[in-house]
Image (tube, rainbow, N blue to C red):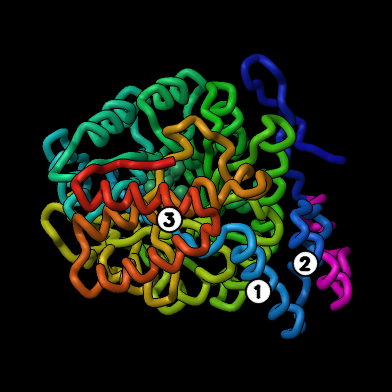
Amino acid sequence: MKFTPETYKIADKPMMPFIDADEIWKFINNTISTKERVKEIITKSLSKKRLSLEEVAVLINATNPESIQEIKSGAKQLKDNIYGNRIVLFAPLYIGNKCSNNCTYCGFRATNQKAIRKTLNESEIIQEIEALEENGQKRLILVYGEHAQYSPEYIAETVKTAYSVKKGNGEIRRVNINAAPMEIEGFRTVKESGIGTFQVFQETYNQEAYKSYHLSGKKTDYNYRLTSLDRAQEAGLDDVGIGALFGLYDWRFEVLGLVRHTNHLEACYNVGPHTISFPRIKDASSLNFGDKYFVSDEDFAKLIAILRLAVPYTGLILTAREPEKLRNEIIQYGISQIDGGTKIELGSYSKNEENNNLDKGQFKINDDRSLSEIIDELLEQDMMPSFCTSCYRRGRTGEHFMEFSVPGFIKRFCSPNAILTLAEYIEDYAKEKTAVKGWEVIEKNILKLDDEKMILSVREKISKIKNGQRDLYY
Ligand code: SAM
Ligand code: SF4
């Protein structure tokens, strides 16, 4: 196998970059996809066995409509069998958009003179968090540009502020981060502030393409970014999220890159990424971006179903970059987390402003439904909106692996916790119509637990919630 000659040191151990573009292209170009093989591979995934890169390439290369439909149905079946009908909800909170990089696809890039720069101060962060809590949010992802001001210490402070705000019955119980890669010490500092997942998206796994989009600043270093989550692991931060920005390069290459990255983390640290994200490029301030690698809705749905089958125990995140109709369709193919009530212009939650000024945000979002509208829609589709934050607070890490592999895990933890967090939401924030539908969905899901003791225990906890207790979980 041919690697680039550089080696990187992670905690004094040399490490080879683990993405080999020639190898990935060989899989894409030399793998033959037949209807029979596609069926075999879907069956293998449904029996909880991991897929090899070659098998993922077979799914990628499937072009006949029948096979594509089977891939989508397989992903749906896998999601239904393994995860059930829960969807975890969160909201992004942009803390600061100063940036010293020049990523040609991003509205925050240093050379964009039109960008309106802002960093929330402590009281603005508090106001934003209060507004988010008043809507019922419990899980946030804090987002930052890459700038000297946003040091690990600064990020850790903002995380602590987020956890400290309590408005009514509201509180933030899990703060995830999307920020620039750090040194090991920096990851340690941020971990100590109590974060959940640290996300770093590679943007594109193709090194040549990467160079052409990242024109200046620290982010020009492909390998430093690629190895960032290895440094997080060395710092003891084992809850990490990876992602690729679709539209920068051939989507087939990126899917294999994401799977290769997952395999690397699993092989080296015994725990894969907690989540995978697959943003598609959206319009942004002063953006003039070609569409050479544009990913159609059809390919987007297909690639998400393939990822579901390829890495069954990793969470998949679909954001409000995508429009409502597409989100409602794609959610079925194995999405486990979505954002709701999203506002990405800095400071806009507390001012209740619309997202309509591209110069104030990073890109255009296409689903601006409120959290309550999203919850209504999920309930209509008989899904269980969940604000659960139990696993990481109970120290059950590698949770998605557990959900997948420990028999009864979902019925013992995930479903009851989803029910309890929805019950809290209904009590504290839901409109009457939502409450009626919500209790119906809760009742149906209680019966599905089919364990008398657990059913009794959940019912007891629900009465406690109705009597004013909060934050009850397994
Ligand atoms: N500045 C940090 C960094 O670059 O790692 C934080 C990331 S940024 C605030 C979050 C992600 O948004 C990026 O990693 C990128 O994948 C995505 N993004 C950037 N520009 C975008 C656009 N025009 N449309 C959709 N997503 C975009
Ligand atoms: Fe800065 Fe991140 Fe945007 Fe690049 S993607 S310009 S690093 S905020």
Q: Which quarter of the figure is the C terminus placed in?
A: top left
Residue behind mark 3: 88
Pick the front one: 295 or 272: 272
Residue behind mark 2: 42
Mark 3 residue element: strand
Tell me if mark 1 has few (under 14), some (14-19) or many (20+) residues whose alpha carbon lies within 10 angstroms of its own. many
Pick the front one: 269 or 147: 269
Could you give the CA–CA distance between mark 2 and mark 1, rounded to whole angstroms? Answer: 10 Å
Q: Is residue 27 magenta?
A: yes
Give the magenta-colored segment's residue range.
22-41
Could you give the CA–CA distance between mark 2 and mark 3, rounded to whole angstroms? Answer: 25 Å
Image coordinates for residue 403, horizontal then vertical, percent:
60, 47
CB of residue at label 1: within 8 Å of ligand 1? no
Mark 1 or mark 3, which has the lower sequence index? 1
Q: Is residue 35 left or right of residue 348?
A: right
Image coordinates for residue 384, horizontal then vertical, percent:
42, 63
> Furthest residue to the bottom?
65
Mark 2 residue element: helix
